[in-house]
Image (cartoon, rainbow, N blue to C red):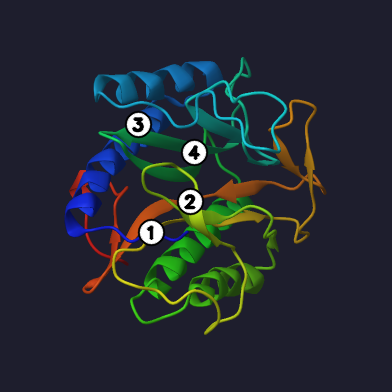
Amino acid sequence: MVELRTPGEIEAMRASGRVVAQALQEVRAAAKVGSRLSTLDDVAGEVILGAGATSPFLGYQPSFALTPFRGVICASVNDVALHGTPGPYRLADGDLLSIDCGSILDGWAADAATSFVVGIPRQADLELIETTKAALDAGIRAARVGGRLGDISAAIAAVGRAARCGISTDYGGHGIGRTMHQDPSVPNDGRPGRGLPLRSGLVIAIEPWFMAGGGDGYLVDDDGWTLRSADGSRAAHVEHTVALTPDGPLILTAPPESESGGP
């Protein structure tokens, strides 16, 4: 069931979104060559705990997972596109790192992700990240009252296809509220003018993830979580929690200094 949020509930979700934004900022600052992924998980955990929030990731076990997730962040390196577990791996110079993080504060969830390069970047990695960010921006711009859910999906895919990126619709964005994953599903490809009507009060996580090799296939490691591009190409993943309002999309997981409506 798709639920709509009141202005007061959206404001409460923005407070949770600020926790996520701070956690992502501090993880990025701590991500250096030689840093362990587990250390970055600790950094995010301290932010979440310090804010009086909890993590919706820690212990999460959806139907596809063999075991509960064991971190407060997903830390995905290079060809890992999604759900990388924050273990003992030490970051190397030039690694492309995607961090996904969530928060539940006063009963309201927020979810966001960012991708960046540690150390000296490859130009191709920077271009992949910028393409994925541009797709997120396009999806947010399309998240307008009176439109359709397919408008968001189509806008994301148009950017990715133009850059010849691989796009899978098996995982994507989602509704969010009292729990992290709710209806509706927001796939990263679709047809404009189709799907759920977009109404004021809808809150969704929009999250493009692209694979540089152009294929849409992926493999899952034995841990049941780590999802890698099938062709071994690098991947990027970005995400914001966004509320639809009469004045346009409102990004709830933006850092406080950049809080605004849609791009």
> Regarding mark 3 in the picture, which secondary structure is present there?
helix
- Pointer 1 residue: 3
In the image, which is nearer the foreground, mark 2 or mark 4? 2
How far from the left and from the top, in percent, is residue 143? 39, 71
Return the x and y of residue 8 as percentages of the image width and height: 17, 52
> On the image, numbered disc 2 is attached to which residue?
182
Residue type indicated by callout 2: Gln
The Cα atoms of the two marked residues, 1 and 4, are separated by 24 Å
* Residue wearing tag 4: 100
Q: CA distance from mark 4 to mark 3?
A: 10 Å
Closer to the chain start, of discs 2 and 1, is: 1
Kindly indicate whether the residue at mark 4 contacts the one at mark 1 (C-beta within 8 angstroms).
no
Neighbor class of circle 4 (other Cα within 10 Å; few <14, some 14-19, many 20+) is many
Mark 2 secondary-structure assignment: strand
The first of marks 2 and 4 along the sequence is: 4
* Residue highlighted by disc 3: 23
* Residue 82 visible in the snapshot: yes
Judged by depth in the image, the label closer to the viewer, 3 or 1, is 1
